[in-house]
Image (cartoon, rainbow, N blue to C red):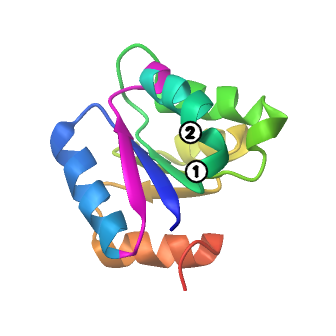
Amino acid sequence: MAKAMVVDDSRAIRLILGRTLEGFGYQVCQAANGREALALLHREGDDLNLVLVDWNMPEMNGLDFVKEVRSNPRYSKLALMMVTTETHIDQVCAALEAGANEYVMKPFTPEIIADKLRLLGCLQ
């Protein structure tokens, strides 16, 4: 079974995205910020296929998380998707340049998430 991590400081968003991914057949783990996600990634990293990460979080934001993950060759094939309220084109570009594979703006629908996962090759 494919495994994904949802990283967001909002418990409600983690729940919504987690249930969405479970509906697509993923086993899901969660983190409330980038630091927590890095610790979880170091424990579960080889089993993870996908990370959905918010931009605005305490302790470590999503952009810094993406940069940190991409600095480690161990995670070079890990699919990273930003799911955030940040809508300015400069922020989209910054996330993609940092190594995010896709970018979804909140609010989102399960269909939008599915479309992005298909683009990433993470969903049939």
| Residue 13 in magenta stretch | no
- Numbered range of the magenta stretch: 24-35
Secondary structure state at the residue bearing disc 2: helix
Question: Which of the image's four quarters has the C terminus?
Answer: bottom right
Residue 107: which quarter of the image?
bottom left
Q: In this view, does 49 lie to the left or right of 75?
A: left
Q: Secondary structure beneath disc 1?
A: loop
Looking at the image, the residue that sits furthest to the top is 59
Residue at mark 1: 48
User: Going by the picture, which residue comes out furthest to the bottom?
Assistant: 124
The crowd level at tag 1 (other Cα within 10 Å; few <14, some 14-19, many 20+) is many
Residue 119 or residue 96, whichever sits in front: 119
Q: Name the residue under label 2.
A: 44
From the viewer's perspective, is residue 19 above or below residue 123?
above
Instruction: Please provide percent x and percent y for residue 19.
Output: 25, 62
On screen, 16 above or below 94? Answer: below
Tell me the CA gap for discs 2 and 1.
Answer: 6 Å
Determine whether, in the image, residue 123 is placed left or right of residue 110: right
Q: Name which residue type carries label 1.
A: Leu
Residue lying furthest left in this view?
12
Residue at position x 61%, y 75% in the image = 119
Instruction: Choose top left, top right, bottom left or bottom right for residue 10.
Output: top left
Assess disc 2: are there few (<14), some (14-19) or many (≥20) residues with their C-alpha within 10 Å of its C-alpha: some
User: Please, what is the three-letter code of the amino acid marked with disc 2?
Assistant: Glu
The answer, for residue 100, to whether it is visible in the render is no
Q: State yes or no: discs 2 and 1 in contact (Cβ < 8 Å).
A: yes
